[in-house]
Image (cartoon, grey):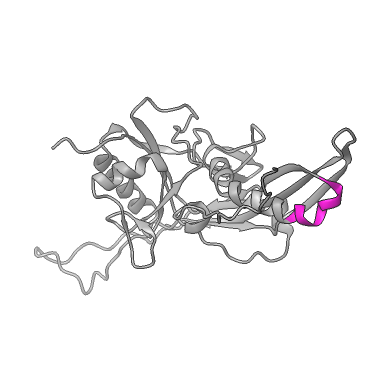
Amino acid sequence: MARQLIDLPAVFTTLPNGLWDTIQTPSPDGAHWQNGVTWVERCPTGDTTYDECLSVTGTGSPPEPPPKTPNVPQEFRGATPFTVIAEFQCSPVGLGEAQAVAQDALARVEQHQLENAFWTGLAADQTVVFPHLAADAEVLDGDVVLQTTASPVVTGADVATALGALEQELADCYKGQGLIHVPRSALPTLAAWKLARLDDSGRLVTPNNNVIVAGGGYPGTGPDGSAPADGTAWMYATGAAWGYRSNVDFTQVRDSLNRASNTLRMQAERTYLIGFECCHLAAHFALGVPTE
């Protein structure tokens, strides 16, 4: 007797604290962002001054303060789009149901593929995703900075030392709540060192309240793209990140009919674009629990 064919009863649930969960997702103004975007990046350093008539030093009045100078650097930055795709074969008779199947397939893989592209810069094995995390060279398009260099702040440290150095550099650079990007393999280490907790909104944060992005698609590679030594990983820090994504598009590749099996190719895809503010920092650290 033939076994009964059923619909899969299990419900797929994405893991929390991934990239799309933790970045800002403003509504784009139209669809032109899918050609790429440019913006003016402002990363102020600030300064202080005083009124010499109202100030004292304990040994008399201070000298005349120096002239005020610009302290808000500005540059053009840009980001490029990329597309996550899921494809399978379907019967021409069942094209209606195939859309639902394709959307489910895309939902199962898009977070992982999004995170991998944002970490590595790779789409279809080509470095075309800008900006991305693992980068050791600047990329320009005219006067627009598409890619900044990840600046290592420490290498080979324990995770507490590495995170501390990374967050201090982030505080000096951004001065607001930033993002700490880590591979999921690092979460047990962060937890063992009591360096990760859930805040009241359910986000994973550091002791300094920077948001932890734990990417299942994050490979933990260094700025030059190389795999870290066994028992180690890289993490990155950025300013606040934001992203756009399109609706899911469906295509039936009708000219791909396989007459032997009477099947067509069904594709579901979604286009993404990710950007981040100001800082781009990296730290290399050891995995494992504290020894004391």
Q: Is residue 147 visible?
A: yes
Q: How many marks?
A: 0
Relative to 234, is 60 above or below? Answer: below
Location of the C terminus by quadrant is top left
For the point 38% across and 67% down, the residue is: 201
For the point 9% across and 63% down, the residue is: 59
For the point 36% across and 41% down, the residue is: 186
Compare residues 103 and 271 and report the one nearer the observer.
Answer: 103
Magenta stretch, main secondary structure, is helix
Residue 124 as seen in the image, left or right of residue 149: right
Image x and y of residue 61, in percent:
16, 67
Relative to 6, is 133 above or below? Answer: above
Res. 100 image quadrant: bottom right
Location of the N terminus by quadrant is top right
Q: Which residues are magenta?
A: 91-99
Image x and y of residue 72, in percent:
45, 58
Image x and y of residue 280, in percent:
45, 45
Relative to 68, is 125 above or below? Answer: above
> Which residue ends up furthest to the left in the rendered image?
59
Q: Is residue 36 visible?
A: no
Residue 280 as seen in the image, left or right of residue 168: right
Q: Is residue 225 magenta?
A: no
Compare residues 35 and 292 and report the one nearer the observer.
Answer: 292
Image x and y of residue 9, in percent:
58, 55
Compare residues 83 and 288 and report the one nearer the observer.
Answer: 288
For the point 39% across and 60% down, the residue is: 203
> Which residue ends up furthest to the bottom in the rendered image?
54
